[in-house]
Amino acid sequence: MFTGIIEEVGKVLTAAPGKLIISARLILEGTVAGDSIAVNGACLTVTGMTSDSFTVDVMEETRRRTNIGKLTAGDKVNLERAMQLGGRLGGHLVQGHVDGTGKALSLSTEKDAVLLKIGAPPEIMHYVVAKGFIAVSGISLTVVSRDTSAFVVSLVEYTRTHTILSDIRIGDIVNLEIDIIAKYVEQLVKPGSGGLTGAFLKEHGFS
């Protein structure tokens, strides 16, 4: 489980089929093989480490649902270690289970902030609500507004400076994870669903 507060921007050193090697510094502190790290919001398992880099394996499911498979050497990535129980939850509960991708449609300024409009498929937009949470490439953001096919988030200077959104361009593909609470609510109210079941919890990472 993550918070959506990015700790560090790393750089892809090697992007091979099924494997990434990423340079990092801060997030390596206290990390050991087997730990989970969110890379652009996708929860990946550390399989190897050096003093200034780590290796993760990338499954086909991850490649299908995220932009991880499009990464190449030199690309920057958002990095976050798994949250510790008892720590501050500065963002929202982010599982690292990316639901799909969206596309940057427009960028505009509003005083000191930048408004980013992201187009998303209907299966994502179904869960997006104004003033609700969404994780964009692992970053916990609040939805400013939405329509049937896109939503807008506001990027303050700190977010732009400390994440890869500082370099985002129109047409870029971003990873999206909807708020898990929306999934729970839908499951609970769905007619004939049987409510919140063990199978549902397991499907969403609670085993």
Image (tube, rainbow, N blue to C red):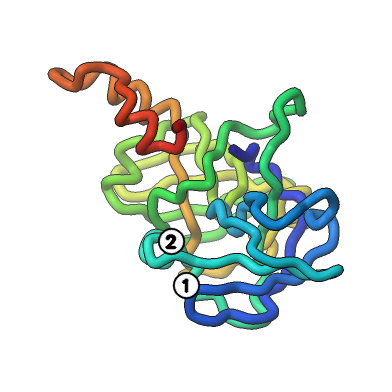
The answer to whether 197 is drawn above or below residue 5 in the figure is above
Of residues 152 and 100, the one drawn nearer to the viewer in this rendering: 100
Q: Which residue is located at x 40 percent, y 40 percent?
A: 146
Q: Callout 2: 10 Å neighbours few (<14), some, many (20+)?
A: many
Secondary structure of residue under mark 2: helix
- What is the x, y in percent for residue 31? 77, 52
Question: Which of the 4 image quadrants contains residue 85?
Answer: top right
Query: Which mark sits nearer the N-terminus, 1 or 2?
Result: 2
Q: Which residue is located at x 56 percent, y 69 percent?
A: 169
Of residues 56 and 80, the one drawn nearer to the viewer in this rendering: 56
How much space separates mark 1 and mark 2, taking CA atoms?
Answer: 8 Å
Say whether marks 1 and 2 touch (CB < 8 Å). Answer: yes
Question: Which of the 4 image quadrants contains residue 63?
Answer: bottom left
Horizontal arrangement in the rendering, residue 11 relative to residue 109 (left or right): right
Secondary structure of residue under mark 1: helix
| Residue where numbered disc 1 is placed | 69
Q: Which residue is located at x 28 percent, y 24 percent?
A: 187
Q: Residue furthest left?
A: 192
Query: Can you say which quadrant of the picture contains the N terminus?
Result: top right
**Amino acid type, mark 1:** Gly
The answer to whether 163 is drawn above or below residue 76 in the figure is above
**Amino acid type, mark 2:** Thr
Any mark on residue 62, and which? 2
The answer to whether 113 is drawn above or below residue 84 in the figure is below
Q: Callout 1: 10 Å neighbours few (<14), some, many (20+)?
A: some
- What is the x, y in percent for residue 196? 32, 19
Of residues 121 and 155, the one drawn nearer to the viewer in this rendering: 121
